[in-house]
Image: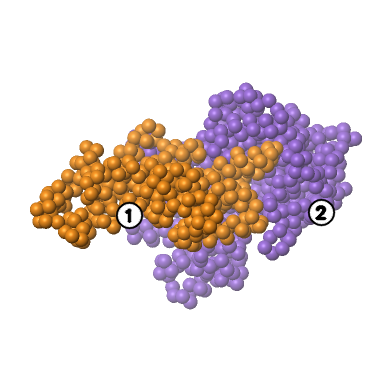
Chain colours: A orange, B purple
Amino acid sequence: MTWYVSRRFLQLIPVFLGATLLVYFLVFSLPGDATAAICGERGCTPAVVTALREQYNLDEPFWIQYLLYLKGVLTFDLGTNFSGRPIAVIIAEVFPTTAKLAVMALVFEAIFGIVFGLIAGLRKGKLFDSTVLVLSLVVIAVPIFVLGFLMQFLIGVKLGWTNPTVSGDATVSELILPAVVLGLVSFAYVLRLTRTSILENVKADYVRTATAKGLSRKRVVVVHILRNSMIPVVTFLGADLGTLMGGAIVTEGIFNVNGVGLTLYRAVLNGDGPTVVSIVTFLILIFCLANLLVDLLYAWLDPRIRYA
Amino acid sequence: MSSIIGNDGITETRPAPPEVRPLLELRDLAITFNTANGEVPAVRNAHLTVMPGETVAIVGESGSGKSTTALAAIGLLPGNGRVSGGSILFDGEDITNASEKRIVELRGSSIGMVPQDPMSNLNPVWKIGFQVKETLRANGLPYAPQDVAKVLSEAGLPDAESRANQYPHEFSGGMRQRALIAIGLSCRPRLLIADEPTSALDVTVQRQILDHLDRMTDELGTAVLLITHDLGLAAERAHKVIVMYKGQVVEAGPALELLTNPRHPYTQKLVASAPSIASRRIESAKKLGVETHDLLAPDTARADAKDKVIEVEDLTKVFKIRGSWGKSTDFTAVDNVSFSIARGTTTAVVGESGSGKSTVARMVLGLETATAGNIRFDGVDITTLGRKELFNFRRRVQPIFQDPYGSLDPMYNIYRTIEEPLRVHGIGNAKSREKKVRELLDQVALPSSMMQRFPNELSGGQRQRVAIARALALDPEVVICDEAVSALDVLVQAQILNLLADLQAELGLSYLFITHDLAVVRQIADHVAVMEKGKLVEQGSTDEVFDSPKTAYTQSLLAAIPGAGLVLPPEAA
């Protein structure tokens, strides 16, 4: 087990190198001069441009630039963005908000998705099942920005139950609505996945045996059907955690949440190379860790899986 | 019909007091399934009585409704099934429409169940001990670790205390079945429903488990409703046998009477051709000095038995098993095996799972390379053949596999399935190939109208006939049957065995028959090789091996053929 975990951590090294190289190369190949983005409309004097090129090593060839960047990362210096703020500080500032949002979305989709999926699976073909199936299909089919604006308008503006946008503090109660919107599509997938998985397990021989042993229906459902059905669902949820951390650009935009997604989006617009590379690398690491967590959870849920 | 089933079965070995009321009684039970095509009757007018402490067996082929009938007794019909008529009485109480609560009360504590497949009936994510414990707990019995261990060790599980902490996948099939028996009997039910409790296990394990089950139910005075497809097994284990066919009880009565004097045509066929019974009859007949010729499958030309078509010499196969830290250990699956097949005869390789018999078959087919030793086909060593020579060799040696469902491509119609090998080997043109396919279908007794059908429209027996036709398409000299009849119902099994024997006589084929079922071997093989853990422990002519087995292992295999205790008059058929 320890060996497995340490091996998985070692695997992070090539993933990290490959990902940073790729992202760095993409940003490097962006058309236009990076200094133009910093100087803006008015432009800078040639002396300032030279100084900037010096500061960000823009005159060096690609490999040297990349290696200098790596050296910085390894000494925990992510450098500064084009406005001169340390990137590490920016991440430390926006990440807690995004993490809060992602975890809330995950909790929402897990609880509601599993409960609804369980009920739908146990009542296959009944009204509840059909309704939920159609609704989940609608949620999957309609783009997230439509759902987001719609819910913002209805709940935030019309009903006034919550602020339509999130303040700088991003309190938990403010984040509820964005979290629901963010988790909505995954909720529909979790629901459907749980339902399918339950349907498969209901017919399993060991479920019949458990019933024949004289167990109550409730116990058969919770102990023998639900736990076995959770195996594929947990895989999905774990992978989704990684996605939610970085993929909240649209939702963060709608609700004006000052999180990682929005920051990354702005950095891309401004051609702020160092910020883009650092944030993407950071997200990749989170994604890898989330996957490792899934694999460990997997072994806990299914004892047939053993890591050596 | 009910008069036959009534109480006249109790006069058997262990009589119950006559005034005792039946423990389980099914009266005119009808069960229907709700399918896409409307209500389909699965069981009609089923009558059945189980007295306290009595063992009653329901015998029938798959789809006969035997399991459905038994499962209805504890309300375990699948979601689309329902009791549509008749009544179920348990100890005098009508439970046909009992409340869910009452049924849950009865399950486990009054009626226990041992299911069919030990691989799928234990929940893989819970420890064995937990699954025993929750049974005890749900039925209001003490469930401390020592109680759990006691239940498991009663069922013959060694070292129960530590075993209880293991997961099902850490158990062998036989151990899992013991755990399931432990669960079934843990609450001391008065009736145990045993649904094919051992059909997924090796014969010797099957025997041990059934013996143990017999002893336990005897000691506890538990009545058993045994469901099986094997008439020999039913006759050996039960006081009373009920034969079901197409959802109806066609015959019922004391076991021996039913075997010696079957009245219904279906029972007669079953008695005449069930392999376990048939092989017993051969044995009995020999003891009585009766000519057994017509009991055996049609004898084939073994005059020039000197001519060996396949010779296997010191064949060895070592597999590398990957361990942790990149280390690997050697596993010898086949260890120095030598045997030969005389042209036009059948050699059977017998063994239990893990004995290496299928690996031998794969090597002879050229699908697996041998680690050492050689295989000579017509005097040529096939282990040294090149790619092209191997391709030609495959024309002359064809396989038939166990699973008639898995070995036919569902996307190919029957014509394409049988024609494919001809096309691959570039034989003839479209017209001559079609003629050949017609001939082949005729040989395996399928109508040529079947050519346009797809595998899913065929029964298991029909599929296996298609597989045989495909194997014969290239006019092979040797056919390797890897458990070719094991997945089939007994009557279909007998038909396929007869077909194989007829084809052998007609085409002079040689068979290598890989099987775990000695009853089948008795009927078809001329020569038997017994394998145990990769080694060939005994070989000889079928008569020699069956009459005077030399090794203890062969003896235990022979003893494990169901119906060992039965001595049958040969004129029974």
Q: What amino acid is at disc 2?
A: Gly
Q: Which residue is pictured at 83% across the width and 51% down the height?
A: B86
Pick the residue in front: B8 or A232.
A232
B514 lies above or below B203: below
Pick the residue in front: B478 or B365.
B365
Q: Secondary structure at mark 2?
A: strand
Q: Chain of mark 1?
A: A
Residue B241 image position (x, y, % from top left): 77, 44
Quarter of the image for residue B190 reads top right
Q: Chain of mark 2?
A: B
Point out the residue furthest to the top here. Answer: B146
Identify residue for label 2: B85
Q: Which residue is pictured at 68% across the width and 50% down the height?
A: B78
Quarter of the image for residue B152 reads top right
Residue B472 image position (x, y, % from top left): 50, 62
Identify residue for label 1: A265
Pick the residue in front: B263 or B47.
B47
Q: CA distance from mark 2 to mark 1?
A: 69 Å
Observer able to see residue B480: no
Q: Secondary structure at mark 1?
A: helix
In the image: residue B9, left or right of residue A82: right
Residue B420 image position (x, y, % from top left): 46, 66
B386 lies above or below A167: below
Disc sitting over residue A163 in the figure: none
Q: What amino acid is at disc 1?
A: Tyr
Residue B214 image position (x, y, % from top left): 70, 33
